[in-house]
Image (cartoon, grey):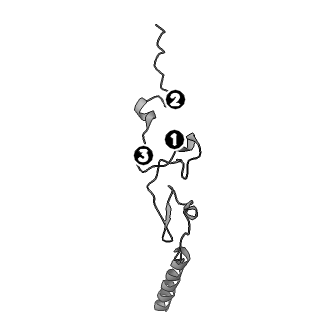
């Protein structure tokens, strides 16, 4: 009886994997199909592949304005925390005194 339960349990466990793992061979057909996967993946041979573009929130596509051009994604970006560097973003921090005009 315990062997039957073990076999049935194993069959149920193995069949559950097919419900979790995607069965399709083609995941995408265009880059737009990969939008749900961040950050900005490309569709290559039917699979969404990480592009390495950044930083988060950058503009992807053909720039049509100066703002788009200045915020275009790049692979040469590194994140920089200016708040930590300057130490002015803490609510308890005080700003330096304003210099008097000469």
Task: Pick whichever of labels 3 and 2 is earlier in the sequence.
Answer: 3
Q: How many neighbours does mark 2 have within 10 angstroms: few (below 14), some (14-19), or many (20 or more)?
A: few
Q: Which of the labelled discs sits on residue 91, or is there none? A: 2
Which residue appears at 41% of the width and 45% of the height?
A: 78
Camera-nearest residue between 45 and 93: 45
Tag 1 or tag 3, which sits nearer the N-term? 1
| Residue 33: image tag | none
Instruction: Name the residue carrying label 3.
Output: 77
Of badges 1 and 2, the one in the foreground is: 1
First in sequence: mark 1 vs mark 2: 1
Percent of width and height locating residue 23:
53, 78
Residue on which the image places disc 1: 70
- Callout 3–callout 1 Cβ contact below 8 Å: no
Look at the numbered discs 3 and 2 and tell me whether their residues touch, using CB distance below 8 Å.
no
**CA–CA distance between discs 1 and 2?**
30 Å
Residue at position x 51%, y 41% from top?
A: 70
Vertically, is 4 above or below 79? below
Q: Residue at x 48, y 71 (%)?
A: 45
Provide the secondary structure element on which disc 2 rests. Answer: loop
Distance, label 3 to label 2, CA atoms, is 28 Å
Under tag 3, what secondary structure?
A: loop
Depth-wise, is mark 3 or mark 2 nearer the camera?
Answer: 3
Tell me the crowding category of disc 1: few under 14, some 14 to 19, or many 20 or more residues within 10 angstroms, Cα based: few
Q: Position of residue 52 (x, y in %)?
A: 43, 55
Q: Is residue 24 placed above or below 60 in the rendered structure?
A: below
User: 44 or 69: which is nearer to us?
Assistant: 69
Position of residue 28 measured from the top left corner of the image (x, y, whole percent): 55, 69
């Amino acid at each position: 009886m315990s062997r039957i339960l073990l076999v049935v349990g194993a069959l149920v466990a193995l069949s559950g994997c097919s419900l979790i793992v995607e069965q399709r061979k083609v995941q995408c057909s265009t880059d737009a199909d990969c939008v749900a996967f961040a950050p900005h993946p490309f569709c290559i041979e039917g699979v969404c592949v990480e592009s390495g573009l950044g930083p988060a929130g950058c503009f992807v596509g053909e720039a049509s304005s100066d703002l788009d051009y200045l915020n275009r994604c790049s692979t040469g970006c590194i994140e920089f925390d200016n708040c930590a560097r300057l130490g002015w973003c803490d609510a308890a921090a005080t700003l330096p005194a304003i210099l008097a005009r000469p």
